[in-house]
Image (cartoon, rainbow, N blue to C red):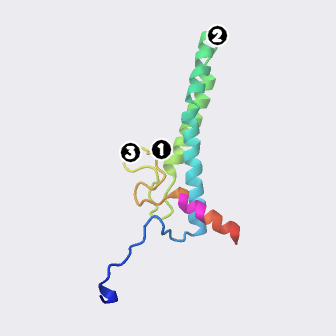
Amino acid sequence: MPDNLQPRETPDPDLISPRILPHQAAAAKALRRARSRMIVCFWTLPLYTLAIWMLLTNHQETDAIMFVYMGVWAGFALDMARRHCPLCEKQFYVKHVLMDLRARRCVHCGFDSHSEASEADRDSVTL
């Protein structure tokens, strides 16, 4: 059989990773940091609830802790919502109105902030 008629092996698209530029690696690191901050807010919600419950049972004011916690929560949510994809320049976590907190990839173009940035970080260390 001639060489041009044999089926070609198509490489796995997950194994092919394009080279990313340093500014894209820095943007991916900022994306990961914004997402991890928001996840920390979710994990500290039970501690916040416990602190409010303890203050209320001791007849203490809860205004200060509520304003601080909600301010931190809103700040991290706005930071996460304003982050843009380094490839398509659209909001990384926001497709329509709601944020996708579980997204590791851009909801528009599919840029993976975890694998691409870690590869760029690894390459910069070896240079």
Question: What amino acid type should be assigned to the residue bearing mark 3?
Answer: Val
The residue tagged 3 is: 97
Camera-side residue of 88 and 125: 125
Q: Is residue 54 above or below residue 83?
A: above
Q: Which residues are magenta?
A: 115-119
In the rendered image, the quadrant that contains the N terminus is: bottom left
* Residue 66 belongs to the span the image colors magenta: no
The spot of residue 33 in percent (x, y) is 59, 49
Q: Does the image show residue 93?
A: yes
Who is closer to the viewer here, 10 or 72?
Answer: 10
**Extreme-front residue of the structure:** 1
Task: Verify CB contact (< 8 Å) between mark 2 and mark 3.
Answer: no
Residue 40 is situated, as x and y percent measured from the top left of the image, at 58, 38
Which amino acid does the dot numbered 2 rest on? Asn
The residue under label 2 is: 58
Residue denoted by label 1: 101
Image x and y of residue 93, in percent: 46, 50
- Mark 2 or mark 1, earlier in chain: 2
Q: Nearer the viewer, residue 21 or 13?
A: 13
Check residue 116 for magenta coloring.
yes
